[in-house]
Structures are given as structure tokens and as C-alpha cells.
């Protein structure tokens, strides 16, 4: 990697507010993710409340409404990243938080299921606060602290995914479903105010260069590491999501009491997220010290090996422990992916390329359940774990082969 690219990727000399920016981005990302995911426990009930009565149609519309946000976000993430390169990353966070405030508040006033789906699409189109925060933190943080900072931010994002459904299971009983949406909108509005008044982004000369460039891809001197990170982001989400369609059925084979199946399945799904929350900042700090590529290859390899015993567990507690350990291993990937991209591209293209990274993760988030459900239904549930294992091991080998050989490029 050239010195020019390294210098371009480094935080601006005047980014003395990086710790404050990290704190606001952490709180804002946690808040917006909570608001986006708290509808999971009551979404089918709300769809029914909006006039859908057939049980099969309720399930279908719930899936469409939930997936609409990620479908839309996958398309616009690179666009928002590109505009952030040109006009500033703070502006993108202000736009996202204000747009989500309006959209999620309006969900509480929806009159039919079509309006709900349209508003979920709008959240995906106008949102992107957490991915925008990744770009801001990646470009404003000193290079030798970037993986730790991104790991801390990733922990907040994953914590939001964990806490959101828990809050969504409690609030509707207290203030009603429509009131819950309005409360979530108010919560994001506070994040909007904090972003507007507390985040300080130093102007960078790279903005002028970003406006001149026709696109970010052509400005990357070595595209191999970036392609590897796009692939790794997709693998990360695919590995996390591949067991989602089969987990309840798989747990039912391990738990004798049918009444405990859903509770244990919920714990299994949460175990990986909890492990990632606890490990993300620590593995990010380790990557700052020893280099990002050893952590990436090691995390993929260890997570892949941990999938093998998951296919042969004989009790639910074994599965819970193994999913937790797998989450610990995978927790270091998100910060390392962002850090490698940040160090591999000039600052004028960082937002657009990190936007492509977000899109690749959404591809994995969609492909994982589809592949897991198909393989689990046609081949067997053990094949889901073993197939995902093969993909992660292959990803580890690929990442290790394409890593830059110079130590300077790793850090």
C-alpha cells in the first residue's frame, strides 16, 4: 500500500473531537437500532390490527414489512456514503436521524398494511444512522485507535439489536402499539438533537477531491483487500443468520419440554449477539496492536471450527455455549472490516466504499436465512452448520492469502 493512500486514509489532523464523536455516535446508533428492532415482538399483532385477518397473510405481511427496510437500505447505502464523502458525514447522520424520526413516528399512525410497508421502505431509504456512524468514526479517529473505536461502536449497534426486541416485548402492554412507535420516534429525535449540536466534524480537503472524482472505486490503488472485506462482511452476516429458520426446530430436538422450546431458542439466538458485544472492542484493540488481517482470518477460522460441534450437540446448554463462543470470535470482524477499508482507500472514497460494505452485509443478512432454510429443509439441519463451516474456513483462507504482506499495511 502506498504512503499516499495511508496518509489519505488517516484521520484529519484537526479531528480532536473524535472521542466526543464516538460517544454521540455510540448512543445514537444504539438508540436508532433499538427503535428499528423493537417492533419485532408485536409486528404480527400490528399487522392484524391494520386489517389483515388470515393467519398465513399475517405472517407473510410481517416478513415483507420487516425485510422492506433492509431491502431498501442495501440499495442506497453506497449513495449515502458517496454523498457523505462530498458533503460531510455529520450531514448524513443528521439526515438519517431526522428521516427515521418522521418515518417511525408515522408508523404509529398507519391506517393499513400498505402504509406500514411503505414507511418501512422509507426507513431503509432515509435511514442508515449506524452505518453512517461507522464512516464518521472510521475517518475521524486516529489510525492507531480506529479498530478499538469501531469495535466499541459495533458493540453499541449489536447491543441495540439485543435490547430492541426486549423493550418491544414490554412497552406495548404499557402504552399500546401505536404509543410505542411514537415513543421510539421521540427517542430518535433526541439522537437527532445530540447529533446536530454535539458532533464536530472537521472539514477535510478530501471533500473537494471526492466531488471531482466520478466514483470511489477507481481511486483505490489495491482493490484486493477491499474485495476481501466486502466478501467477509457478507460471510459474517450469512454465518449469523443461516440458522435463524431452523433454530426453533433444532432446539425442539434437544429440549424435552415443548413449553421451553421458544425460550431456549431465544437464548440461543441471543447468545451469539452477547458474545460479540463483549468481544468487539477487545478484539478491535488487539487488531490495533497486532494487525487487522490476523484477527480477521483467525476469527473466521475459529468461528468455522465452532460450527462443527454445533451440528452434533446433545443438549441445549451445549448449543448456547457454542453460539456464545462463536459470537465472541465473530465480534472482531465488523470493526476490522471497517478499519481495513478505511486504511485501503483514500479519504475521498471512504464513505462510498464503506457503503458498499454495508450493502454486502445486507446481502448476507438476506441470503443467510434463505440458504439455511433451503438446506435445512432439503438436506438436513446438520448440513446448515457444516455448510456454513466450510464457507467460513474458505473465507479465512481467502483473507489470509490476499492480505498485504507489508506490516505497515496491516496496522
Image: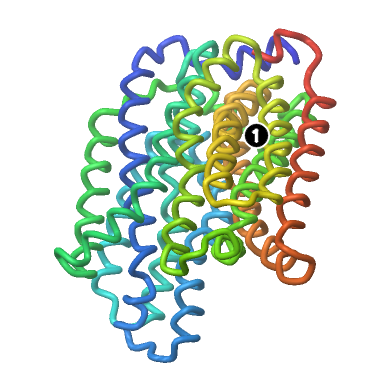
In front here: 86 or 397? 397
Q: Quadrant of the N terminus?
A: top right
**Residue 40 showing in the rendered view:** yes
Q: Whole-percent x and y of residue 296?
A: 68, 27
In front here: 230 or 272? 272
Q: Whole-percent x and y of residue 62?
A: 45, 74
Q: In which quarter of the image is the C terminus?
A: top right
Colour treatment of the image: rainbow
Residue 235 against residue 208 in the figure, above or below: below
Picture residue at 59% right of the left edge, 56% below the top? 75
* Residue 30 position by quadrant: top left
Picture residue at 24% right of the left edge, 56% below the top? 185
In front here: 317 or 378? 317
Residue 266 against residue 28 in the figure, above or below: below
Q: Residue under circle 1? A: 213
For disc 1, the neighbor class at 10 Å (few under 14, some 14 to 19, many from 20) is some
Report helix, strand or loop for mark 1.
loop
Q: Whole-percent x and y of residue 410?
A: 69, 15
In this rendering, would 93 be left or right of 61? left
Picture residue at 41% right of the left edge, 68% below the top? 259
**Residue 205 showing in the rendered view:** no
Q: Whole-percent x and y of residue 326?
A: 60, 38
Amino acid at each position: 500500500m502506498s504512503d499516499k493512500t495511508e496518509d489519505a486514509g488517516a484521520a484529519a489532523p484537526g479531528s480532536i473531537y473524535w472521542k466526543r464523536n464516538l460517544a454521540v455516535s455510540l448512543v445514537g446508533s444504539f438508540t436508532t437500532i433499538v427503535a428499528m428492532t423493537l417492533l419485532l415482538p408485536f409486528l404480527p399483532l400490528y399487522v392484524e390490527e391494520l386489517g389483515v385477518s388470515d393467519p398465513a397473510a399475517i405472517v407473510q405481511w410481517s416478513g415483507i414489512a420487516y425485510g422492506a427496510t433492509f431491502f431498501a437500505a442495501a440499495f442506497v447505502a453506497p449513495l449515502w456514503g458517496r454523498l457523505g464523502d462530498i458533503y460531510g458525514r455529520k450531514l448524513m447522520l443528521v439526515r438519517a436521524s431526522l428521516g427515521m424520526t418522521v418515518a417511525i413516528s408515522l408508523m404509529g399512525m398507519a391506517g393499513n398494511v400498505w402504509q406500514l410497508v411503505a414507511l418501512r421502505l422509507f426507513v431503509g431509504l432515509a435511514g442508515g444512522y449506524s452505518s453512517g456512524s461507522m464512516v464518521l468514526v472510521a475517518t475521524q479517529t486516529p489510525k492507531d485507535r480506529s479498530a478499538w473505536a469501531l469495535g466499541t461502536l459495533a458493540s453499541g449497534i449489536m447491543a441495540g439489536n439485543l435490547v430492541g426486541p426486549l423493550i418491544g416485548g414490554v412497552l406495548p402492554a404499557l402504552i399500546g402499539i401505536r404509543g410505542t412507535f411514537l415513543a421510539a420516534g421521540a427517542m430518535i429525535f433526541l439522537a437527532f438533537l445530540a447529533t446536530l449540536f454535539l458532533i464536530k466534524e472537521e472539514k477535510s480537503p478530501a471533500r473537494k477531491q471526492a466531488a471531482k472524482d466520478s466514483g470511489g472505486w477507481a481511486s483505490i490503488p489495491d482493490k484486493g483487500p477491499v474485495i476481501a472485506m466486502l466478501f467477509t462482511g457478507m460471510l459474517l452476516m450469512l454465518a449469523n443468520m443461516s440458522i435463524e429458520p431452523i433454530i426453533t426446530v433444532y432446539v425442539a430436538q434437544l429440549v424435552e419440554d415443548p413449553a421451553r422450546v421458544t425460550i431456549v431458542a431465544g437464548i440461543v439466538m441471543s447468545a451469539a449477539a452477547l458474545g460479540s458485544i463483549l468481544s468487539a472492542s477487545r478484539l478491535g484493540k488487539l487488531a490495533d496492536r497486532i494487525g487487522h488481517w490476523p484477527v480477521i482470518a483467525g476469527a473466521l477460522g475459529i468461528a468455522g471450527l465452532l460450527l462443527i460441534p454445533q451440528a452434533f450437540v446433545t443438549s441445549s446448554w451445549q448449543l448456547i455455549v457454542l453460539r456464545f463462543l462463536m459470537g465472541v470470535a465473530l465480534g472482531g470482524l465488523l470493526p476490522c472490516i471497517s478499519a481495513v477499508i478505511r486504511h485501503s482507500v483514500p479519504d475521498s472514497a471512504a464513505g462510498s466504499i464503506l457503503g458498499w460494505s454495508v450493502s454486502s452485509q445486507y446481502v448476507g443478512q438476506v441470503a443467510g436465512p434463505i440458504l439455511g432454510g433451503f438446506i435445512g429443509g432439503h438436506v438436513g439441519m446438520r448440513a446448515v452448520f457444516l455448510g456454513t463451516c466450510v464457507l467460513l474456513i474458505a473465507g479465512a483462507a481467502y483473507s489470509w492469502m490476499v492480505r498485504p504482506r507489508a506490516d505497515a499495511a496491516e496496522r
